[in-house]
Each structure stands twice: as structure tokens, then as C-alpha cells.
Amino acid sequence: MISRRNIRVKVMQTLYTLLSTQPDTKDTATTAGIKILNEKLSLSLDLFTTIVAYINSVAQYAETDARFRSSKYVPTEADKNVNTKIAGNTFIWKTLENETFRQKLSASSIEEKIDQDRVKKLYQQLCGTEIYAQYTAEESRDSKSEKAIIRYIWTELMINNEDFQSFLTDELAGWEDDKDMIYILMDNYFKNNTGINFMALLSGEKLDYAKSLLRTTIEKEEYCMELIEPKLINWEADRVAQIDLLLLRMGVCELLYFPTIPTKVTINEYIEIAKQYSTPQSGHFINAVLDKILKDLEKEKKINKQDRLSK
């Protein structure tokens, strides 16, 4: 469900968290690191599921609104005839019928995290739009329009809504760290919501990659630093940003110990992560250091890459 870049970021964040714990041994560090990594992945999956649950709740609120308005002491004709078409939206119901979605809602108490006042506000905003008027005016249902109205809730009422963005930042743990990844996950969701496994953020192969990258970066720390430190021209290792050093260690490990990942891919990925998560100069710094290390390793014939059999 997520890319290798997202995985690299999670591993980087895990290693950064480990810096404050100072484990006694590498085995202890690896064990603690795997636990932290799993917790971070679980939190990300909770966040993604919560976003999907919010969208579902907005659509289903049509029935709540209809019941409330029809129960008024003196209901108007409009109150008696609230259109509840969106509550039966076929795209939404494919998600609701997804067994892994139901399991995740229960296992992580996702529904308890849903702010019903916020759901009501989003629903009312939706009702005031032209696209919703057009949607409810159509008696038939087709998969394209069913998906389009749900995507509209996400893209217009949530992503492009400053008030809701502030709400996510304040109320949902991990949103600021994970929002770019959530955007990718939501794109995947709208491509095929029936194929989403809400109980597992990573496939088995990608989870193995994440744990292996974490474990290798911990175990090979001394050797990697032996390669890195001579390349820190005019810089002492303790003056380099901690995130940059972590990214360099991860990058060197990929160059040496992950034969199916091309060297160019490794270097480009860590440049982009450095640009996003470290200092303005970090992308250039990571590029320069990894490039020098790669040239040395190639001269020593220590780089052995092979064609990747799977993504």
C-alpha cells in the first residue's frame, strides 16, 4: 500500500527515536527498533482508516439528518423529504463490506475517534454544494458518479479545507508526519477500495524490507561510519545533522547489502528524503557524500547489484 520511500522515512524516524533510548547492545537496539517501527506503522494505518471512516460517516450522516429533521415538532416539507441517496452510496458500501475494514474499526476503536460535530459540519458543507445537488438529482446510480461524490468529500471538503486541516493536525496523532503518505494511500483507495487490506499497511515483502533496513543500519553502524567520516570534508561527524547521518548510514547499507535496489535509486531517494525532513542544504550534502562513497566502493568491487524480481 505504501512506497519504499515511505518505508525509508519510517525507518529513519525509528532510528531517530532510538537515539534517545541509548540501548546497551545492538541486539537490544534491534529489538527496541522493531517494536518502535511496528508501532509507527500501526499508527499510520490507524490514521488512514480514521480518514476513511470520516468520509463514510459524512455520507451516512444523511440518514441521521433525515431522522432529526423529520422529528421536528413542526417539520417542513423539506424536512420530511431529505434526500438520503448518499447514505447508500455504492462506493462507500464496498468499503463497509470490506472485512478487514470492519476488523480494523473494532481492533483500534476507530469509531471512538470520530468527532460527530465535525462530521455534521462536513455534511452541511457538502449539502450546500452544486455537485451534491446534481448527485442527489440523479435517480440512478453509476460507479463513476458514486465514486466522484466521495472523492469530492476528500479532496474539497477535507484536503482543501483549512479548518479541517487544522482539526487533523490538532486532533489526530501523526497527521503532520504522515499526511503525504496518507495522500498516496487515499489515491490507492480511490483506485480500488475493495482491494485494500486495512489490517496491514505493508505487504510481507515490504515489511521484510523495512525490518531488514532497520536491522542492517543498526548492525553495520561502525562500518558505515568508517566509510562516511572520511567524506565529511570540513565537517566533524558530531556537527552533522543527526537525520543526515542516519540517512547516510541507511544509504550506505542499501548500496552494500540490498542487491536488488539500483544505486541510482538509493541515492535519489535519500536526497529527496533529506530535502523534506532535514536542512535546506541536506539534499546536496547527502548526494555528495553518497556519490563519493559509491565511487570508492565500486573501485573496490564491493557493489554487487542484480535485477529485481519483484517490487
Image (cartoon, helix red, strand yellow):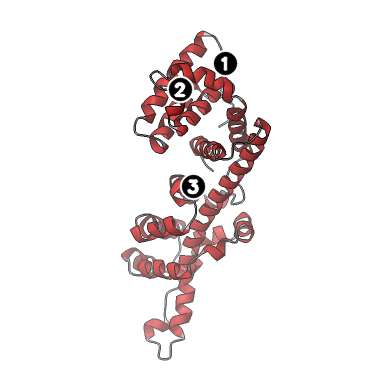
Looking at the rendered structure, the secondary structure element under dot 3 is helix
Image point (61%, 28%), residue name:
216
> Going from the N terminus, do you reach mark 1 or mark 2 first?
2
Vertical order, 26 against 45 (above or below): above
Give the residue type at disc 2. Lys
Which residue in the structure is indicated by mark 3? 185
Is residue 145 visible from the viewing direction of this image?
A: no
Mark 1 to mark 2: distance in Å? 13 Å
Give the residue type at disc 3. Leu
Q: Nearer the viewer, residue 5 or 12?
A: 12
Res 207 → quadrant: top right
Going by the picture, which residue comes out furthest to the left?
130
Give the residue type at disc 1. Asn
Q: Taking 108 as reference, is 233 left or right? A: left
Which residue in the structure is indicated by mark 2? 264
Q: Residue 182 location in percent, x, y?
A: 47, 48
